[in-house]
Amino acid sequence: MIDDASPDMGFFTDVTLCIGCKACEVACKQWNQLPSDGYALSGNSYDNTGRLSATTWRHVDFVEQFDRINPAESRWVMMSDVCKHCTHAGCMEACPTGAIIRNEYGAVYVQPDICNGCGYCVPACPFGVIALEPDQGVAQKCTLCYDRMKDGIEPACAKACPTDSIQFGPVEQLKERARRRTEELLARNVPARLYGVDEDTSVGDLNAFFLITDRPEVFNLPPKPVLPSTYQPVAYLSGFLATAALAIVAMQAFRSR
């Protein structure tokens, strides 16, 4: 049961348990009344949604790794991607209206009635998660099923996952569980690692983190996510130096007259 004194809540997604059934995608769309992405094949494995978007808040990546020299070494890995609900969220940092907040469960939440559709949050997200919904003109992404949590119910995607690849709960408890799972897999010579836990990045730890079995790029995750604001001091300094240089050149030009 979730109450008002609840600690930060989040997701632990274990790719070694994902079977690519897309039950999480369907459950997310059904509960949040999101429109279908159509039935056309993308030509990229069994992935017809392509990526996270304003109308796809859960997306199952199909990673096919075929070894033509040694076919027995080929493998097929699936991962259910979602908003990371970062400790330092770029979208929340860039929002000029205060529409994006961190709610009482530690989730990064977009208030649609306050969003003005400026789109500043879109390039500010280093994971390419948040997007503008074209019909309503507001930013949309995973809400961590805020409405369900307020009623003490786990998010629809985690509830629907048949293998417990998606696990929901207090973030600190999930981290401990994930560390134990990683140690277990490493002991079995599975190249497992955690993504979004105990990493030195400008976004901080992720409240929706992953256990992966390859490089982050394989799962369309940046190896070292960076907030755009990280570059602001250098940009300001560059602008100041350029202005100073132009001022000096202008003064020299006037003196030479």
Image (tube, grey):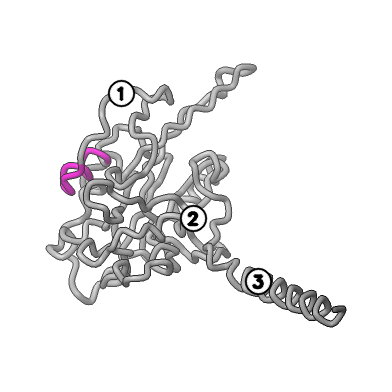
Decide which of tag 3 and tag 2 comes sooner along the chain: 2
Indicate the position of residue 101 as horizontal and vertical percent values: 31, 70
Mark 1 lies on residue: 40
Mark 2 to mark 1 CA distance (whole Å): 28 Å
| Residue shown at the point (30%, 40%) measured from the top left | 163
Identify residue type, mark 2: Pro
Q: Is 53 contained in the magenta span?
A: no
The disc placed on residue 126 is 2
The disc placed on residue 239 is 3
Helix, strand or loop at label 3? It is helix
Indicate the position of residue 1 as horizontal and vertical percent values: 17, 65
Mark 1 to mark 3 CA distance (whole Å): 48 Å
Identify residue type, mark 1: Ala
The disc placed on residue 168 is none
Identify residue type, mark 3: Gly
| Residue shown at the point (27%, 68%) measured from the top left | 105
- Pick out the residue farthest to the right: 256
- Pick out the residue farthest to the left: 151
Q: How many marks?
A: 3
